[in-house]
Image (spheres, rainbow, N blue to C red):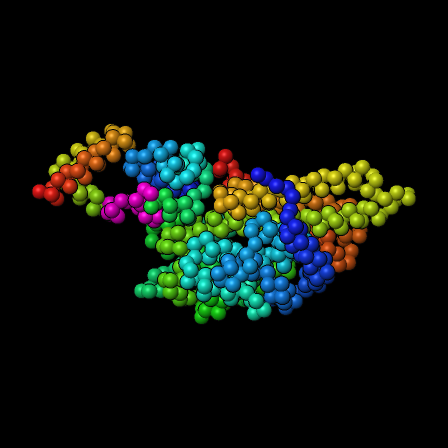
Amino acid sequence: MISFELSTEQKRVELKFRHLAKKKLHPLSLKIDAAEPGPIDPAYLEILADEDLNAFLVPKEYGGRPLDFLTLSLVIEELGYGCAGFASIYGATLHAVSALLIGGSHDQKAAYLPLLLGHRGRPAGCCITEAKGGSHTSSFSTNAHPDGENYIINGTKSPVINAGYAAFYVIWANTNSGRGTGDINAFIVPGDAPGISVGQYHDKLGLRCAPSATVSFHDVMVHKSDMIGFPGSGYPLLMQSLDWGRALFSAICVGVAKAAFDQTAAFAKKRSIRNKPIIKNQGIGFSLADYATDICAARLLVWRACRMMDRNVHYSREASMAKLFAARMAAGITSDGMLIMGQAAHTGPNLLAKFQRDAQVLRILEGTDQIQKMIISSQI
Amino acid sequence: MNAYEKIGKKLQEAREEAGLSQEELAKKIGCTQASLSNYELGKRRLYLADLQRIGLLLGKQVTYFLDESYTPDSFSLDEIQQIIKEQYLHEILLAAKQLKASQRKSVLDYIRWQQDQGANQ
């Protein structure tokens, strides 16, 4: 049975994090967005720890307070409402955790998941993309060479969100033994492992509040027990982890679109021309009606993908549909909002201008529109 | 052919080798025949847990589905070329090539029966 009604607990969660978004994230994000590229802002780390947000991702037996995926999407939507960069910091941790939850052993989970929790909890990082590989996720030049009981990792991953702050990284590497995708493996690497170095933080168009950098691995030694899953299992693990991420990053897009919509609608009600609020002009009012409808449709796509994840049925196509629609919608609404607000959105520190830049980057993160279409069309 | 199409093809081979129809295997793994067909065509992504479950049912290690260079007993091409030079093996291979997958499975069953007979003598 499909329900479009949130439970009392889900509504409570939504309200709590909407409050956090408006009261803390909105003001902080304007300041951080305008600053030079640098490490994660301490205020953001404090919020992550104070709210113990990572606990929502971790099973009870490892000290967490897990939420179902649908409720988690509500939290992420509200974090996205507040600041897509903050939500992406959280999303990067989610990505690393997803790999552990999908393919990790009990020992790996017990060793690494508690590092994310409580007041000392830190984010985690996911090392997938390489500068030359782009979206070709099965073509990794980062190499994991077997050496007795260990693997020696060499290579460079970029961009990596949470670089330099991760309690641990999950890295995908190639064992290059001629087995094609069967050579791709995932490893857990402690954030302070010898041989890891972090480059300059990237100066980005959007998601400036989620610092990213190049992470280099030079002769980084990991024990074979740090491989997630079994030899050769990295490819399906990566694909499932990406599906997981797409469904939940779509919620960030919905949050950004909703925040942009609220700001634009408030402006359209307040701004008058010839004693009439501009929302009364059909050119504006009808556009806002379209945006409200699109946001609702995107949210339902996210909910559907999350509901399928909760039911443990295949959600690959549905996750990509949610990502494609929500990211495109967020880019459209934030951009159109700039036209409606005109000069007010273009001058001075303004959240809408930040939303627009963030939305453009969200359209690339977790796979561009074209990647989502490839995934969807391959499953038709 | 993308990675999931390759995995799907191996799944189909393993299912046919086990002499199971799509309906029979689908029933065993708890999905519909249409879903299994989509897995075999690479139209639906097989997740890690699915591969492990299917591998167990079909007597295959998961690496069988993922390793693009996999041959059943991991012989090199040179070794295979040497093996088929042995008496009758070349003819058996050529004759088996003309058969449907289910017929090849019967031949394989007969060979295994012969092996069992040999072991019991």
Most foreground residue, A53 or A60? A60
Work out which quarter of the rendered image holds the N terminus of chain A and state it: top right
Task: Decide: is B101 above or below A319.
Answer: above
Picture mark count: 0
* Residue A5 sits inside the magenta stretch: no
Q: Main secondary structure of the magenta part?
A: loop
Q: Position of residue A242 (x, y in %)?
A: 51, 50
Q: Is residue A238 visible?
A: yes
Which residue reaches farthest left? B121
Tell me where the magenta segment starts and ends, as one range: B57-77
Q: Is residue A202 visible?
A: no
Most foreground residue, A332 or A123? A123
Does residue A223 appear to the left or right of A313 in the view shown?
Answer: left
Most foreground residue, A134 or A316? A316
Task: Decide: is B21 above or below B70.
Answer: above
Q: Position of residue A121 (x, y in %)?
A: 56, 67
Q: Position of residue B94 (x, y in %)?
A: 21, 32
Q: Residue at x 66, y 50 (%)?
A: A8
Q: Residue at x 20, y 46 (%)?
A: B79
Q: Residue at x 65, y 67 (%)?
A: A43
Which residue reaches farthest right? A275
Q: Position of residue A284 (x, y in %)?
A: 79, 41
Does residue A326 appear to the left or right of B19 in the view shown?
Answer: right
Q: Residue at x 77, y 52 (%)?
A: A345
Which residue reaches farthest front? A8
